Image (spheres, helix red, strand yellow):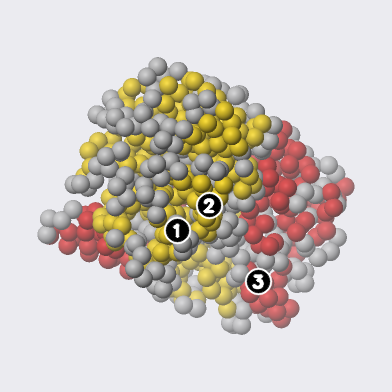
Amino acid sequence: MVEVLDSAAPGRVGPFRLTGRLGRGTMGTVYLGRSPGGRLVAVKVVSPGLAANAEFRRRFAHEVAATRTVGGFHTAEVVGAEAEAEIPWPATAYIPGPTLQQAVETQGPLPHPAVLVLAAGLAEALAAVHARGVVHGDLKSTNVILGEDGPRVVDFGIANAMETTNLSTTLHDSAVFLSPEQIRGLPAGPATDVFSFGCVIAFAATGRHPFGTGTPIEVLRRVLTAEPGLSGLPAPLARLVKVCLAGEPAAQPGLAAILRGLSRPIPRGVPWLPPKVAEMVADRRVASARRAPGRRGLLTAGLAVAAAAVSVPLGAALASRQAASLVPGTAKPGGPALVPLATLDLDSPDTTTALAFSRDGKTLAVSVEEGVSVWDIPSRTKKAVHRVTGSRGPIGTVAFAPDGTLAAGFGAFEGLAMDIGAIALSDPSGEPIAILKTASDDRVSLDPMGEVSFSADGGLVAGGRSGPEGIGKVVVWDVATHEQVRELIVGAHKGGDTAAVRSAVLSPDGGTLVAGWGAGLFGGLAFWDLPSYKGLETPEMDTGALGATGLSFTADGTKLAVAYGGVGVWDVAARTLAVELFPAGNMTTQYQSVSITPDGKTVAASFAGRGGALALWDVASGESLGTYTAGRSGGGELAFSPDGRTLAGLAGSAELRPIVELWTVA
């Protein structure tokens, strides 16, 4: 939690105004601060003892310079540092959330699905820093923050700067996570982080250290001579952790091999953190906000008062401040552009993950905590909330049939089963029609129901999910009879624990079913002919770690836009990539949501998280039409209206509340 500053604490470090203390350790004190623009940061002020060590200062300057180049979903961005200051300090973006150590100490071990997400996130973070020639060297439970949207690894480089200082206090803090080569006094390398990764995952899953506890010397002796204790770990995790804890670096798996079985899943239907830990995240977010409202908070309050005074709806009053703004220098003269239209405040405490337009474009459905919020677009007012029961998490996906029937996909409760995917059908008034459920495979599933889609005539509904037979599967139901008519396996006998079909879409012309899938560091598409359900092709693609996460057809079904870390448009008949608008492989820009205009001329794609944004492209030329900021933390799910004149996108407000931003395509 955030502690009040005492009289001995500095009021300012570099350009950052300090507002509270986050923690204190052997390396220094971590403070909560604000940048001149109001952004929250974590500032680590190095202890005086380290500051007086010349060799530490030299190495610290080198490590900070290297870590400034590191990006990725699961690291905290370095936003400032002064190695030459009287007391050196680095500053990173502030991630509200407990450390893994705090979460396990107070709430117990994490459940298996959360451990899989944690493992994938840490592996991806380490892969990102190793690609920049940086080794963490001190990965441990106190250096992992559990954020709302995934884990974050912090304190890169500081441990490496301490290698020559020989401080015994460091040994006390880190003994249970040290690798054999560190104990022997050898330089830290990538294998060092892999070994510590195995220790961290074992601790997260069991609450115990694999080499036990005791004095540092006792623990270090067991690391060098004993087998790790892995009882209580599920079999797949036990196998992974055991090879990571191999005594010799040559016997350990590389991060690429680890990620092939561990891809971070899309947060559809299931929050990644257990409820009690999620409460700890919320508490820290509230505490950090209370430390100092900042200029944006004061502006928002002022706008609210002004809105009330002139009887303007609050959502409309805030639209100009919260809506996307064009990043200077990115627009193409004469091309389509986004003009802010309105902002819809969803009045929901949780992050939303899905939205969809009705076939006439007059209604927008958005997933919220209690079900699906339905909005009238012409008046921009909320009409109703279609409540969904039996969900073990928020609604992950929504879709409209031609007659207005609404489908909401989610992970369902049924006894002890943890892998049941479900689709709730309701009529336009919100009256429940049926809940369609997949059978249990008697396993834990992180992605029980991905994106869902209706056929052109509304007679079928399909959804993607994970499955033990392969990478994943697509399940198809008859809407009228509520009977399952097909279960289509993708990548038989392939995939890992978190592999899944992320999305499934039925083409508007009724002739094709396409699924987007991901399995570790690779992903791709799968095509079937309709109505025969004959498999046509399952092309692999060079994707981000999530695979192919977003699919969007043109009105005639001839083109398919795909988000796969990169963004591309496929020729459906030829089943080939016609134009790549943005390549995959960029560690800091991973597009996850996509929509194409009905006429196939323009594509919009977005990604959330640090530096998240929304981008437009011209399909014919492949040229960028502009990049836009979207909400406070980037853009979420996107959808063009059926006439292509309006774009709706999920985002977060300045207060981290879920909102929908509406733009006119001009």
As drawn, 225 above or below 189: above
The residue at the point 27 percent across, 43 percent down is 361
Label annotation for residue 578:
2
For marks 3 and 2, give the CA distance: 38 Å
Circle 1 residues within 10 Å: few <14, some 14–19, many ≥20: few
Instruction: Determine which of the numbered discs, if any, sits on residue 79 in the image.
Output: none
Q: Is residue 275 left or right of residue 340?
A: right
Q: Give the image quarter of residue 398.
A: top left
Precedes in sequence: disc 3 or disc 2: 3
Which residue sits at x=77%, y=62%?
A: 189
Q: Residues within 10 Å of mark 2 (few under 14, many from 20)?
A: some
Q: Is residue 356 left or right of residue 534?
A: left
Residue 609 appearing in the image: yes
From the viewer's side, name the closer residue of 619 and 28.
619
From the top left corner, tell me how far across and down residue 475 is, in percent: 51, 27
Residue 448: give x, y in percent of width and height: 52, 32
Q: Mark 3 or 1, which is nearer the eye?
A: 1
**Pointer 3: what residue?**
66
Label 1 belongs to which residue?
620
Depth check: 575 or 276 in front?
Answer: 575
